[in-house]
Image (cartoon, rainbow, N blue to C red):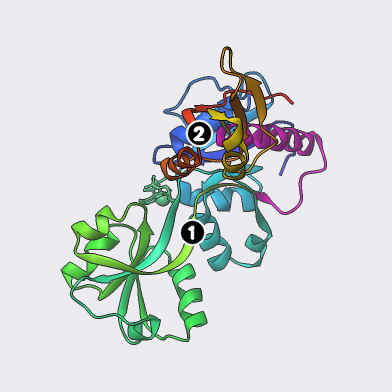
Amino acid sequence: MKPRDRLRIAMQKSGRLTEPALDLLNRCGLTFRQSRDKLFCFGEGEPVDLLLVRDDDIPGLIAQGVCDLGIVGRNVLNEFKGTAGDGAATLTEWRSLGFGRCRLSIAVPQDVAYNGPNDLSGLRIATSYPGLLGTWLREQGVVATTITLAGSVEIAPKLGTADVICDLVQSGGTLVANQLRETDVLLQSEAVLAGPDALPTDERGDMIELLLKRLDGVIQVRESRLLLLQTSRNTLDAVTRLLPGGPQPTLLPVAGQPDQLMLQALCAGEVSWRQLEEIKKAGAREMFVLPVEKMLA
Ligand code: ATP
Ligand code: ZN
């Protein structure tokens, strides 16, 4: 194949991963001439173009060298690695991207007793992930029949075409609506940046390294929160001990209240209501959690 001088990233044309993937690339400073109805999107600033395809095609496009990178669910990537021939094993997750979170799980009809994977022996399991299911069944030492379906896996038990299913679950709402209950998690999944094991040695490799650095910055900021609160000096230690991980907090005096301090802390992840309530119990008040837009240390 003729070498390319521009980087090409494959992503889902239309689906759950499309908007968050584009948003992430935009935040990395990549913009594209809008031709979203087309297969190909030309990158404007940097020499990076997009190929918009079905998510299932993404690992194959990278493995064939048609694209340099792809944004795809770990479920799709690992299914490909497990079922395609030897060459496919050279695909790697370069980064996990924190969106498109879901899990691949076994679910059984609500009214069926289930005590563990052994209960699947001899059953028919409907799935779109025969590779991942097969590997898991082998690990469990269970022999069952895999029924491979392209979609609507969740209705197979009701239709009588399978006894149980192995499907993606996010909130679990679809399972409940189909009188199924989740029993075993085979894989925790999210969108990942996938690429070949080894970076290209030409300009495209340099561009990938630049992109990975920008991605790390974007991901770090996206997960950061600025926590602001007030505390009196005598509860400061108790409050500080409960702060979610991050660099040392900054302390500021509060005008007219010598006993009070304003505390400012950068937190490495989400700050939950529960954490806030605990910190409040320790003596904090006037608490704010703010998203961080940009960070330059
Ligand atoms: P395509 O037309 O590209 O093949 P699709 O129907 O296979 O689309 P989507 O339903 O858009 O794909 O899901 C894309 C990815 O989103 C999944 O592979 C998975 O990684 C992730 N995902 C997150 N939550 C869910 C969910 N509840 N159900 C299915 N996929 C989910
Ligand atoms: Zn798909």
Q: Magenta residues, as a range?
A: 195-224
Q: In the image, which disc is placed on residue 222?
A: none
Residue under circle 1? 188
Give the x, y percent position of residue 181.
27, 67
* x 56%, y 30%: residue: 232
- The answer to whether residue 239 is seen in the rendering is yes
Q: Is mark 1 within 8 Å of ligand 1?
A: no
> In the rendered view of the protein, which quadrant contains the C terminus?
top right
Q: Looking at the picture, does residue 126 appear above or below residue 30?
A: below
> In the rendered view of the protein, which quadrant contains the N terminus?
top right
Q: Is residue 36 left or right of residue 297?
A: left
Give the x, y percent position of residue 185.
43, 67
Cα–Cα gap, marks 1 and 2: 36 Å
Q: Is residue 212 magenta?
A: yes
Give the x, y percent position of residue 102.
42, 53
Give the x, y percent position of residue 183.
35, 71
Q: Number of callouts in the render?
A: 2
Q: Is residue 281 magenta?
A: no
- Disc 1 secondary structure class: strand
* x 51%, y 62%: residue: 79
Other-residue count near label 1 (Cα within 10 Å), few / some / many at <14 / 14–19 / ≥20: some
Q: Indicate which disc, 1 or 2, sits on the residue closer to the N terminus.
A: 1
* x 17%, y 68%: residue: 158
Q: Nearer the viewer, residue 163 or 205?
A: 163
Q: Quadrant of residue 201?
A: top right
Q: Quadrant of residue 2?
A: top right
- Disc 2 secondary structure class: loop
User: Overall secondary structure of the magenta stretch?
Assistant: helix
Q: Looking at the picture, does residue 168 appear above or below residue 208?
A: below
The amino acid beneath tag 2 is Ala
Between label 1 and label 2, give the one nearer the viewer. 2
Q: In the image, which disc is placed on residue 284?
A: 2
